[in-house]
Image: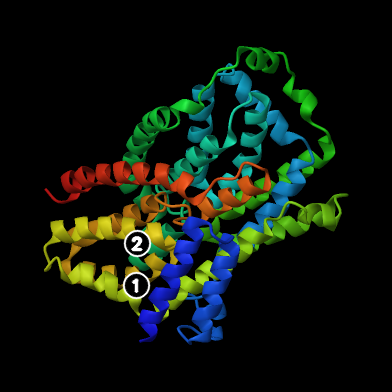
Amino acid sequence: MTATAAVVIFVVAYVLIATERVHRTAAALGGAGLLLLIHATDGRSAFFSEHSGVDWNVVFLLLGMMVIVGVLRQTGVFEYVAIWAAKRAMGRPFRLMVMLVVITACASALLDNVTTVLLIAPVTFLVCDRLALPAAPYLIAEVMASNIGGTATLVGDPPNIIIASRAGFTFNDFLVHLAPLVVVLMVVFVGLCRWLFRRSFVYDPVRAAEIMQLNEKEAIKDHRLLWQSLAVLAVVMAGFVLHPVLHYEPAVVALLGAGLLVAATRVTVEESLRDVEWATLVFFMGLFIMVGALVETGVIENLSEAAASATEGRLGLTTMVLLGASAVLSAIVDNIPYVATMSPIVSDLVQAGGADHQVLWWALALGADLGGNATAVGASANVVVLGIAERNGARISFWQFTKYGLVVTVVTVALCVPYLWLRYLT
């Protein structure tokens, strides 16, 4: 009975988020409150459980990086990069998008994809403003490139870290098994961008000529603060990459970097907190609690087990069902709690089937990571970008994102089928 009520509340809240009848933060908080009220989850599970509670690592990673980005914004470095990128693209809109999505994908392979979009979004707004281009298509393309690029490595997307921990995979394992496919997916994605966003590529020769006359070095307002910020950012990035060695969670690294930057510079606390997307952080908390309630009541586990049992032990069918189910479910719920719930089931299947069943791990990773592109709430980076866009007056609606995301997800997941089949199942 509780599980049924939890599903109903989740669906209603999701519909409110999708239709935007109420603000997504209000819908998420309302749904979380009702699920706590009916005991679908409780305070201990919602706030302290590693598998079904608020993922504080995500929340505080966002908070720390938002503070760092807020300080960086005051130096003028984003204006510098925006002018540099626009000049290299010769003011051509599609060339600019290709440049931005490739940079985003490569950065997301080494950094958390949320961190990457936090850094690239301010540049996007500035360059689009200079060229009189709509920012929304560029932001949507960048966050999708981030989710695709992050699939390639162990540290690129949080679900990959969970899978690596459970399966015992190394950083190189992800590079060998997933990076070749991700390169192909990015080439296809660039082609999709040319088609999906074709109406946004309006070239303005006057604006382009004005851009070419600018000197990007003049955009830097505070050289001392810039070097201080870049030094702290470099240390933070190194901390992210060296996570397997140092064993500091990314959230801890981000908060230490934010604290150091605020303490060591002349930036006031009020100025450093001005750019924090508080509504986005609270939305994440509510969303995690709602998904956690589905985990606590066994809804997600039952769905996953049903999909696994329906394949009757046939490896090829199991792999494809797992790929498709992971993509669908990760489009609806955040892929972090989904993978945390599904990984023990996959582990049992792999141990029972032997070495050739390792393909199930890659199917899970690809489905969960790429499925996050399907909807505006499918991945953490999506939600962050929507929050930034709204704050900067370029609001992206749930359906505006999703109509592009569904196409990208269907195409990229479909390309995974022949890859998995030819490389592991023949």
In this rendered view, identify the residue nearer to me: 82 or 93.
93
Which of the marked residues, 2 or 1, is nearer the chain's N terminus? Answer: 1
Residue 57 seen in the figure: no
* Point 65% across, 60% down: residue: 279
**Quarter holding residue 194:** top left
* Point 50% across, 60% down: residue: 17
**For this view, does 38 lie left or right of residue 419?**
right
Residue 344 rendering spot, x and y as whole percentages:
32, 73
129 is higher (above) or lower (below) than 230: above
The amino acid on which the numbered mark 1 sits, given as a three-letter code, is: Ile
In this rendered view, identify the residue nearer to me: 330 or 12.
12
- Mark 2 in CB contact with mark 1 (< 8 angstroms): yes
Residue 245 seen in the figure: yes
Residue 231 rendering spot, x and y as whole percentages:
72, 44
* Point 63% across, 23% down: residue: 131
Question: Which residue is most to the front?
Answer: 21
Q: Mark 1 points at which residue?
A: 300
47 is higher (above) or lower (below) than 101: below
Q: Name the residue under label 2.
A: 329
Q: What element carries label 1?
A: helix
Residue 188 rendering spot, x and y as whole percentages:
34, 33
Residue 161 rendering spot, x and y as whole percentages:
44, 60
The amino acid on which the numbered mark 2 sits, given as a three-letter code, is: Leu
17 is higher (above) or lower (below) than 183: below
**For this view, does 271 lie left or right of residue 113?**
right
Q: What element carries label 2?
A: helix
**Quarter holding residue 368:** bottom left
